[in-house]
Image (cartoon, rainbow, N blue to C red):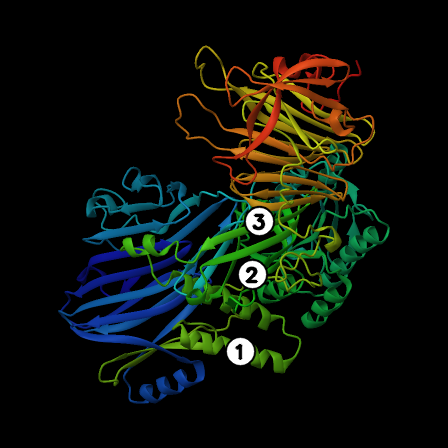
Amino acid sequence: QLQVEDDDKIGLYSYKVQSTITSRLANTMIQAKMVNNAKRSQHIVFDVQVPKGAFIDNFTMDVNGITFTSKIREKSEARKMYSQAKAKGKAAGIVRSNALDMENFKTEVNVPPGTRIQFELHYHEMIRRKLSSYEHLISVKPGRLAKHMEVDVRIIEPQGLRYVHVPNSLGDHFNGITTISKGEKKAHVSFKPTMAQQRKCPTCSSTAVDGNFVVQYDVNRETTGGELEIFNGYFIHFFAPENLDPLPKNILFVIDVSGSMWGLKMKQTIEAMKAILSELRAADQFSLIDFNHNVRCWRDNLVSATPAQVEDAKKYIQTIHPNGGTNINEALLRATFILNEAQNLGMLDPNSVSMIVLVSDGDPTVGELKLTTIQKNVKQSIKDEFSLFCLGIGFDVDYDFLQRIATDNRGMAQRIFGNQETSAQMKNFYNQVSTPLLKKIQFNYPQESVSDVTQSSFHNYFGGSEIVVAGKVDTDNLQHLESIVTATAANAELVMETLRDVEELDGFMKKDKYADPEFTRKLWAYLTVNQMLAERNTAPTAALKRNITKSILQMSLDHHIVTPFTAMLIENAEKDEIMLADQPKDPRRGCCPGTLGLTPNAPNNNKGIPAWANVTAVPVSFMPEQRSPPVSSLSINRVDNDPHFIIHLPKSQRNICFNINSEPGKILNLVSDPGTGVVVNGQIVGAKKTENKKLNTYFGKIGFYFKSKGLKVEITTKTITLKDGSYGITLTWSDTGHIIRKQLLISVKKENNVTITVGEEMSFMVLLHRVWKNHPVNVDFLGIYIPPENQFSPAAHGLIGQFASEPEVYIHHQRPGQAPEKPQATMEVKGNKLTVTRGLQKDYRRDRVAGTDVQCWFVHNSGKGFIDGHYRDYLVPHLYSFLKKP
């Protein structure tokens, strides 16, 4: 907003906003150029809105060729320098005031007639992912028509852009003016309205440009373990897995119904709560508490979110009439009591997430009034695994307190306007926390290679959001950086591995002239400072607070940013004119903008895989010593390629082979063991077309069913899915990681193989064969390897399972075959005499491309005589069916 005394005489000849986003780091520059056409001096105000939590890092001003530049100083030192200069009578102040999500940066200058003046403000911020989208908000309020006006946004995302969208946030007036050009990893958004397009109406002299310009986008995600980006001695780890089932939640809504909530606030709150209750899932448990000077519970304990209970809760909310005072302490202690009691009585699913959501519009007026005591009481009574989320309505609420108490208890706070938008804002906030997908998330990196890592353990991960961890990395002595993320999902423990070449980004970054080469350093500093601000907010002692303040100050000076402990001095070259940019403390707002809802580090006491990866949830004895089972030289039963079966008979040290050519879609049983309750079936896929009048067939899908555990595993050429009742968890072949559930371990090696290990008793390996995507004939397929050491019961059957009890085999009368390298012999087995041929088959475990040759005796006619009955006897109706007894 540019304000002046004599409006008509000030010309705004350029208003420009340039923003470049490099891997979620947005650098923004706002520039205004003006001229004073009046006959006398004019007072000009440059007032722009900066997103809360953004770091201002530079401000310059040019008045008739005299340039003012900025430097960052410790706050009291800056104020001292400023007041000394002010005593000389040459000064103008810069104040920052506060709105909901924005802060104002404001400077006033007295401009002589005919003078040209240019203001330029630079700030940067990390764009956080909310509700599956990154939203970059730029305040565009020039306050008058500009001869040249431009908003220019460039996005550079090495992960690749899924979409870029610019909603019509400035109003229908500007339909069709924004242009978007999007490539695979880059996009350019431009908004350049002409002077005529800026006018409110054809004859108006006022501008219609007044609001926020918004760009929304999301990136591609290949792996569940997240993306590591390494550049310039820093790493950034972006983690936002998606294909997971939600964890059940236990949620208590604590609603302020004191007199101050009367009218619009209450009406909007009721409307939002009805919508929120409708969205609870069947597996969730909930209750409602409403409070004024008294505390009332709709139910004294948690109840399941059945349609009947939800309807009853909605009716209860309708009857609320706000009046009386505000007893926040009692209300929160009642909520923690209900959760604690449910936990003590064993009523909470161990995999569930428990949370309290407080909605209030004011400070306590009844009961305990001291905010620090309330904070202490809640902290003492709430269990380590519960979270507290706070919604502050309007500006009468001490938002600083809500933020502190939420951060202190693994949650976050949000301020909400008390107006027509209240209901939408409440629903939006709830949607951010309504879908917990993981809990107890721990990020591990090799300690000798990384340092100064930001917060690396998180209480919960909510769908649609993103966890970001950053640190310094010793790229000189390291070729690859490995990370291991462990977490608890709805039905399993997850261990995800990510490996990145430390130079992988170098070429991409050097080629792009818009990408910020400092993006990793700035993101690391942004996360580190915000984390320190949050820690300072909840520091238990004054000494600790002082130490944290010192660290924040040093970081602010090192990285040239304005924080609550620094100020920006703006002066001309002669240093005789000086200005101060400062951050006033607003008692009705958090001490520091942008303190994020960070959780204190979760306790961690397990030694896992490898030594530096703390795997909290996995019983150590159960993690296999090797990453994949040993490849025993050849003693294994397997089916690979065009269903080629190789059966190894350990006693007679022979390999017997046979092929089965069935039709695509059919499912063959490989192992059916009612004794141990294990089934392995394979579904046939065909090549894209026939060759030499024959259609090649392969296994395209393999199903495992472990009946005693109630677990099913489905492996296709695209995904690996573990199913446990109605819960499912899916990894893709782009992942390297482990899923652990009920002593069953699934280990995925990226684009290579999957190993399934069941305790000490048995293991299976499935190999992935990828072909060229556009191959005219061939398709991707799977091979399966089953060690004969597997402890199946005597009742085991199936094309492979029947050989768990090794049959007597007698091979004699070797003679030359039709081809000299393929001699023939007679094999006696199971009372049959068969003619068999000596030949070679492939084992692809060591070399997935060429395979290793294996000598074997080949049984013709789909194994007839060697397998019991006919191969058609092994067809089953479903992927998890046991074989029917003949």
Question: 629 or 29: nearer the eye?
Answer: 629
**Residue pointed to by mark 3:** 429
Q: Secondary structure at mark 3?
A: helix
Can you give x and y, in whole percent of width and height, for residue 642 in the image? 54, 22
- Disc nearer the start of the sequence (3/1): 3
Question: 660 or 477: nearer the eye?
Answer: 660
Q: Secondary structure at mark 2?
A: loop
Can you give x and y, in whole percent of width and height, for residue 296 in the image? 79, 52
Q: Which mark is residue 334?
A: none
Quarter residue 817 falls in: top right
Camera-near label (2 vs 1) is 2
Q: How many marks?
A: 3
- Give, as a three-letter code, the residue at label 3: Phe
Question: 377 or 674: nearer the eye?
Answer: 674
Camera-near label (3 vs 2) is 2
Q: What's the CA distance linking mark 3 and mark 2? A: 32 Å
Mark 2 neighbour density, 10 Å: few (under 14) some (14–19) many (20 or more): many
Can you give x and y, in whole percent of width and height, for residue 308 in the image? 76, 33
**Residue occupying image coordinates x 38% and y 49%:** 157
Quarter residue 635 falls in: top right
**Residue pointed to by mark 1:** 549
**Residue pointed to by mark 2:** 445
- Give, as a three-letter code, the residue at label 2: Tyr
Question: 432 or 773: nearer the eye?
Answer: 773
Q: Quadrant of the N terminus?
A: bottom left
